[in-house]
Image (spheres, helix red, strand yellow):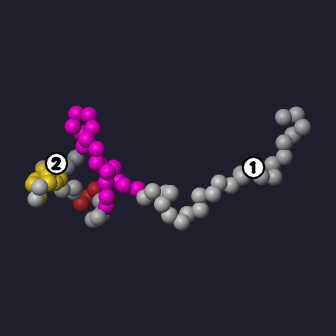
Amino acid sequence: MNLVKTRKVGNSITVTLPKDLGITTGQEFLIEKGRNDVIILVPKIPNPFNGSDDLTMTDDFGGVALLDHE
């Protein structure tokens, strides 16, 4: 576990994240302050509904015949 220390940059308080965490420059995070002042960083993921992907539902049971006793 790494120990980091806050510092003041302009009007903000920052924490430097160690390079070995594999976080890239410009990566966005959602931040939440939880119980007992625990700070949680969650990587922001793209909205799957903002785009040109075809999200049309298909009939997975097309052509399936039922048996007589069902």
Q: Nearer the viewer, residue 17 or 12?
A: 12
* Residue visible at 88% across and 34% down in the picture: 69
**Dot 2 amino acid type:** Leu
**Dot 1 amino acid type:** Phe
Residue 7 included in the magenta stretch of the image = no
Q: Which mark is residue 27?
A: none
Residue that badge 2 annotates: 3
Say if residue 22 shows up in the picture. Answer: no
Q: Nearer the viewer, residue 14 or 10?
A: 10
- Give residue 31's position: percent from left, percent from top: 28, 48
Task: Calculate the distance from the C-alpha at mark 1 to the C-alpha at mark 2.
Answer: 55 Å
Number of numbered discs on residues:
2
**On screen, residue 54 above or below 41:** below
Q: Nearer the viewer, residue 1 or 40?
A: 40
| Left or right, 54 with reference to 9 | right
Residue 34 included in the magenta stretch of the image = yes
| Left or right, 47 with reference to 11 | right
- Write the start and end of the magenta stretch as one range: 27-45
Q: Earlier in the sequence, mark 1 or mark 2?
A: 2
- Does dot 2 land on a helix, a strand or a loop? loop
Residue that badge 1 annotates: 61
- Give residue 65's position: percent from left, percent from top: 84, 46
| Left or right, 17 with reference to 9 | right
**On screen, residue 61 above or below 36:** below
- Give residue 2's position: percent from left, percent from top: 19, 49
